[in-house]
Each structure stands twice: as C-alpha cells, then as structure tokens.
Amino acid sequence: MSSSRMRRRAAAVAALAGTAVVLAAVPAFAHVTVQPDAAAKGSYATVSFKVPCEEDDASTVKLEVALPTDHPIASVSIQPVPGWTAKVATTKLAKPLTTDDGTVDTAVSTITWTGGKIAPGQFQQFPVSLGPLPDDASSLAFKALQTYSNGDVVRWIEVPQSGQPEPQNPAPVLRLTAASGDSADAAATPSATGSPAAAPADDSGTKASAAGSDGTDGTARALGIAGIVVGAAGVAFGVLAGRRRGPDDRPAGTSSSSS
C-alpha cells in the first residue's frame, strides 16, 4: 500500500473516531437535570428542573417528576410557567413529619406539567420550592418522565451510583451539603440595639495607623519649613551681595556720575 493511501486511510479512521466521540457525548448534554444541583440540609431551596428537547422532529409536551418517598418533603410550592399547567399529587405518610408549623401527614409525591411545548433545540425550566430538606441524607433523586408529541417517553429514572459510570438515563439528583455552622450565624446576629454586632476594634492597629499618619504629617511640615528658610536665606544673600558691590564691581564701560 502506498504511503499516500495509508495517510488517507489514517485520516478517515481518525475522522470516524472523532464522530463517534461526538455522538457519544451528545446525550450527556440532553439530560433532564435539577439546577442548582446542590442545597444545604434542613434549608428551603428553590430549584428548577431543566428539560431540553432531544428529538429533531417532535416536541416535549409533558413532564412528570416524582419526589422521593423515602425522604418526603413537607412543603412544596410551584412557580407558574407560562403555557403550562401543573398538577400535584399527594400521598399519605406512614410516619408523619414534624415541622415548625405542626405535624404533616401528607406530602407531594408527583408533579406533572402539561399543556405547553418545548420545540426541538429548545429547553424549559420548571421552578419548585422545596423544604425543609432532610438532614439525614446526602442526596435526593427526582425520577422524571419526559413525553414527546410523537408518543415517545424517556424515563430519567436511573439513580447514579458513586464510583460507577453515569447511566444512560440518569435521574435528576440534588446533592445535600452540610448546613451552615453556628459561627456563621453568630457573625450575622444583631446586637442588643438591633444593629449588627461590630467587630472589636484592634487598638494596636489603630495606634500604629495614627502614629504613621502623625509621622507623615510631621515630616511634611518639617520639609515645608526648611524650604521657606532656604528661600529666605537665598533672598538675604542676594540683597547683601548687592550692597557690598562697589565702584570696581561695576561692569566695564560704566562710569560713575559726578556730583
């Protein structure tokens, strides 16, 4: 085989390999996801389910999101999305939840959005407020079903496992981070007067700053006085020099006037 043919073949193989990599990477950008993907334990958070339309000849017309039943959430509210209607289903809890507002024995199990359309090449976000988030879990998985206008249903229900490759149809996962510490809360706690507590002043730093300022001002004054003295001395020297100049000191060709 000639060297030119070998080079052409190698280029063709490389092009095919590159195409395969691109095609394999496309689904990674088309998942249904929850954003932001992290929130503090015990907090109330507003998250959005971001839904892209993957198909070229069909639109997304329905989204169903299941909330976790092993860690039910007491309060769920939905932000209206223009063109879409949200329907909420609840379930009876085997173990009621205790909240600041009392005991909750039912929780939202699914939210279904219909009536709108996500065209090919577009995406839509569906905001939801959740809380309080559980403090005994590291993450929450929200299994989702995406329905297209041609009848196709994509089931985003595979929960990613640590140390394992990402599944083909991963469920949206919200990571739960450590709650804010008491130290951070104390720093923002108002004082008895109602104003935020001020940090204690550093006397040494204040004195050092004042000393540095006084030293700078003193130096500037001393330099100014010295300049005045030097200038005055120069003027006095010029006057005295003029008085001491006698007839012999006059420029050549200048005669004295007779009286």
Image (cartoon, rainbow, N blue to C red):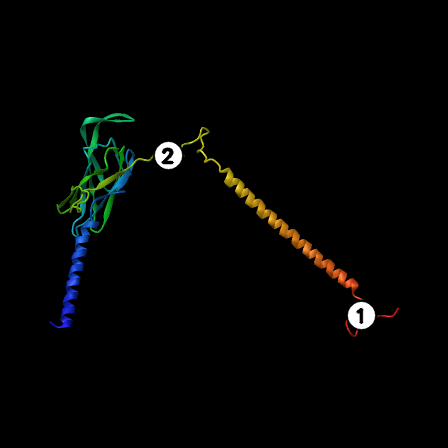
- Residue 215's mark? none
Across and down, in percent, residue 177 comes to 28, 38
**Can you give x and y, in whole percent of width and height, for residue 241 in the image?**
76, 63
- Which amino acid lies under the numbered mark 1 shown in the image of this protein? Asp
Q: Which residue is mark 1?
A: 248
* Residue sitting at x 78%, y 69%: 249
Residue at x 17% of width, y 62% of height: 15
The C terminus: image quadrant: bottom right
Rendered position, 2 above or below 115: below
| Gap in angstroms between the C-alphas marked 2 and 1 | 91 Å
Give the x, y percent position of residue 44: 29, 34
Decide which of 49, 29 is in the foreground and name it: 29
Judged from the image, the secondary structure of the residue bearing numbered disc 2 is: helix
Q: Residue furthest left?
A: 1
Are the residues tagged 2 and 1 within 8 Å (C-beta)?
A: no
Q: Which amino acid, mark 2?
A: Ser
Q: Which residue is mark 2?
A: 183
As helix, strand or loop, the secondary structure at mark 1 comes to helix
In the image, 169 versus 146, the foreground residue is 169
The residue depicted at 63 percent of the width and 49 percent of the height is 221
Going by the picture, which residue comes out furthest to the top? Answer: 102
The residue at the far bottom in this view is 253
Q: Is residue 158 left or right of residue 135?
A: left
**Residue 81 seen in the figure:** no
Position of the N terminus by quadrant: bottom left
233 or 155: nearer the viewer: 233
Residue 8 visible: yes
Q: Label 1 neighbourhood size at 10 Å, few (<14), some (14-19), many (20+)?
A: few
10 Å crowding of disc 2: few (<14), some (14-19), many (20+): few
